[in-house]
Image: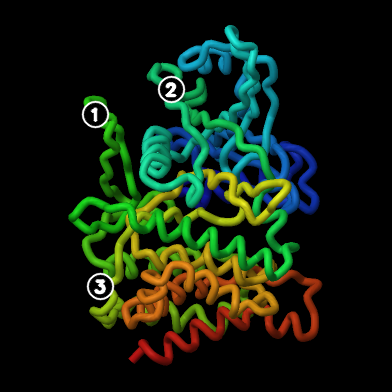
Amino acid sequence: MTLKTFEDAASAVLSFSFSGALGPAKDKSVIYSLFKETDNSFTFMVSLCSDTELYTQPIDRYLVVLDRITGEIERTHRIELDIEECRKIFGCFTKSRITKHTRFTDGSLSLSYKVTCREYETEDEVQYVVQLRHHADVSSMNAIMQLVSSTIDPSVLPVPQVYPISDEGLQRTKLGMGIQITRFVSGIMGDRIYPSLSHENKLIFIKRLARAFGSLWNIPLPPERLIGELKARTNEDDDRVELSVGPDRRYSLGGPFGTVADYLRAYIRARLFAFQKQQGIDEYKSQYLKPVEDFVKKGMLNIPAIVEVIPVVPVNTDMALHNIIVSETDPTNIMAIIDWEYCDSAPYACAFPVIEQLFRQRADNGFGLEYPDGLSLREAFWNEIPEWKRWNESEAGTVFLEWFCFGLFMKAEMRPGDVQGEEKANFWAENKRVVEGFLAKYDS
């Protein structure tokens, strides 16, 4: 079978992964991402894991190469960073010897190692995290993290110290993956502890995190007011971090966009494409796919002009609980916010999905019920940053979120087969409420 498109290749790599070639696949999901495409092949980064394994333990990652002509698997390669390669990398910036080199908890599409070094002169031990990233612009990530740490009080928004690799030949692994090195920060990941916190402790944590969001949004951007991926570089002459805005890569939206309306149109079209491709929601699609398609085909020319006044700011769109390290002794104390791969110049309200999870319980449908007293949690967050609360309650903020949430909620999650009764009836209730309300207001 000839592989003509990305979708053909993705289907082939999913079939291969579930065949058992990468290990037992029962009760596991496949995480995959296109690593490289040539005239002759597709190369995917692939892993198998259960929901409990993701973000909680190291996961084996593989490069799977598919021949475009035959459709067959050409080869597979387990991704790893060996100790010798690690020693060469660390020789660039530290006078120490590596005493321990072990796999560490990963991100969804990165590999991590925890490396312990002993200083030659003092015999002090220092621990680092080494991450292999195939998607991120590591030098830009490092510069953004350095900008944050140098301009924002670390007690408000702490980030790990980064160690840029000066030797260009060692900035990427033999497989071509970018390498980022940061200081190891001890603690517990926020998503593991937050749901079990008392309401009082949730309030303390939320107020602290609100100040972190607010401080990031106050970093000045270039005057052009473009919307897209936020890029950064360090000026070698004066060590000043310079910001620029490029096309969106995370969702392949293109750009950068000069207006909020253009950004919203691109975002909604991308979300419609994901909705069309979503599996296992035929019942939901039968009600909502055509109305949504019809609305999008009309061009979305009726986006109210008021959205153009919403502040465009630096937004870390993955500043979520799974990337927040809290103290083991005081889980309301934020020790570090990690993983700055997805930073944008965008309307501040694009952070809605990661902020909203602070007020809702976990759920398979992606939009769980609010915590008891969830309203007071939401109020506590915005009351802590009154400047942004005013924007959130403004007409511009309200209208922007109507359009943004239409894109966010139009694609429903697959409903598990064992869901019954009231839970089954309500599984897509939030999706339906948002989509129906939006179309009733704007599809004229």
Q: CA distance from mark 3 to mark 2?
A: 40 Å
Residue 328 image position (x, y, % from top left) = 72, 46
User: Which callout, 3 or 1, points at the residue further toward the start of the chain?
Assistant: 1
Residue contact between numbered discs 3 and 2, judged by CB atoms under 8 Å: no
The residue identified by callout 3 is 309
Disc number for residue 330: none
The residue identified by callout 2 is 165
Residue 63 image position (x, y, % from top left) = 58, 33
Residue 214 image position (x, y, % from top left) = 42, 60
Q: Amino acid at mark 1?
A: Asp
Which residue is rendered at x = 30% and y = 35% of the image? Answer: 233
Extreme residue toward the top, this view:
121
Which residue is rendered at x = 50% and y = 52% of the image? Answer: 7
Q: Nearer the viewer, residue 89 or 364?
A: 89
User: Which callout, 3 or 2, points at the residue further toward the start of the chain?
Assistant: 2
Which residue is rendered at x = 48% and y = 73% of the image? Answer: 383
Q: Amino acid at mark 2?
A: Ile
Residue 420 position by quadrant? bottom right
* Residue 274 in view: yes
Q: Amino acid at mark 3?
A: Val
Q: Nearer the viewer, residue 213 or 356?
A: 213
Q: Nearer the viewer, residue 431 or 211?
A: 211
Say whether residue 343 is left or right of residue 127: left
Residue contact between numbered discs 2 and 1, judged by CB atoms under 8 Å: no
User: Which callout, 2 or 1, points at the residue further toward the start of the chain?
Assistant: 2
Q: Circle 2 — which element?
A: loop
Disc number for residue 238: 1
Q: CA distance from mark 3 to mark 1?
A: 34 Å
